[in-house]
Amino acid sequence: METLFYKSNPWWEDNYTFFGKQRWLYLRELELFFTNKDIIFLTGLRRVGKTSILKSFISQLINEKNINPIHIFYISLDLLALEDLTITEILKEYRKLHKILSSQKIYLFLDEVTAKENYAQELKNIYDLEDIKIYASSSSASVLRDKNAYLTGRQRVIEVMSLDFNEYLDFREIKVKKSDSYLLESYFEEYMSDGGMPEYVLSGDISYLQNLIDNIIYKDIIAYHNIKNESVVRDFYKLLMERSGKQLSLNKIANILEIGVDSARRYLAYFEDTYLIYTIEKYGKLNERLKNPKKIYAGDIGLKNVVTGFRDKGAIFENLVFLKIKNQKPSYFYVDGIELDFMTKDKTLIEVKYKSILNEKQQKLFDTTDATKKVVVDGYEAFLKI
């Protein structure tokens, strides 16, 4: 146990500085909540960079806030050696190792916290009884569903998204002068092809993305939910990617795969849980939202392109717009057979047209719809402004 703890926490023995790429958007958010007691959850796709963000923040705590490195404990809870230990027991072993009193403040970083079945109740008890600032990560959306409300009022959830366009340029070490801004369009097309999974952007190894998809589907869906028919689950994902940006008929998918509609609905929820996909509802009253099909988007456009190929740039561009405005709670807008892409929570109407224009019926609906703001996103320049 001691060896494992020291391997996981190199700052206990040596000077520590994180030299990887910094994701300042998330580091600033972690900084914002540093002084309060809230439990901070980082959640999002596997390999989207949650662990790097945590270790980057640990580096800041040590080098900028002068926190004693011994009082910072990082551990990944999905390690096999920890399988039979609770979070409380792991924490106790750490305190014993360094002779840290229960009254002394520590900073606890728990990677893949949902590997422990009763994590929510344990974190509540630790939060209530000890002077600990807790940071945790999860690759499952289940962290958002605290069924017994153990962490209500005690947590803040930060979803880590794949790289946005500015981060993409930074990771590739591309700096474009204002006098050369015309180059941005070609780099944006590369972004539309590559997507924003950090390791892929750094390496360019396309097999990495395919292996990532396979690992997520097997570990987080097939094995986790004990599904026997693996090929159906993998085919289900391919169909979802083909339908990215479209209304999704579970009946049609069920018929194609020769499975029940209830199974299709359950598989869809599993994929949402992994952040491989997102769904949005039709804009309107509750009964309209419930009875109409959802639209589907890929969690990362590079992962979609591995499955479908780099084609239909309009659909790819729409997916990127969705990922950029996701925190504005968009719905799709649909009236009498005419669809506009998004209506956000604050009633901003957004239509996405990659290098094209609205048709006559869309333009009429766009012009006559009541909205606080209306935006047509027709290319990378408009994309950068939203």
Image (cartoon, rainbow, N blue to C red):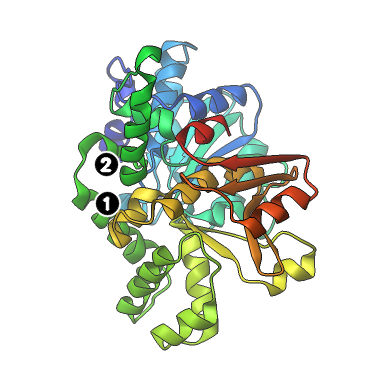
For the N terminus, which image quadrant? top left
Task: Report the front residue among 16 and 239.
Answer: 239
Asked which quadrant contains residue 7, the reply is top left
The quarter of the rendered structure image containing the C terminus is top right
Q: Residue at x 56, y 67 (%)?
A: 247
Residue type at mark 2?
A: Tyr
The residue pinned by badge 1 equals: 209
Question: Which secondary structure lies at badge 2?
Answer: helix
Crowd around label 1: few <14 · some 14–19 · many ≥20 (10 Å): many
Q: Amino acid at mark 1?
A: Leu
The foreground one among 291 and 367 is 367
Q: What residue appears at the point 29 percent right and 31 percent down from the top-left corner?
A: 6
Q: Position of residue 95 (x, y in %)?
A: 45, 32
Mark 1 residue element = helix
**What is the distance, in whole Å, between disc 1 and disc 2 at their CAs?**
7 Å
Looking at the image, residue 370 lies above or below residue 181: below
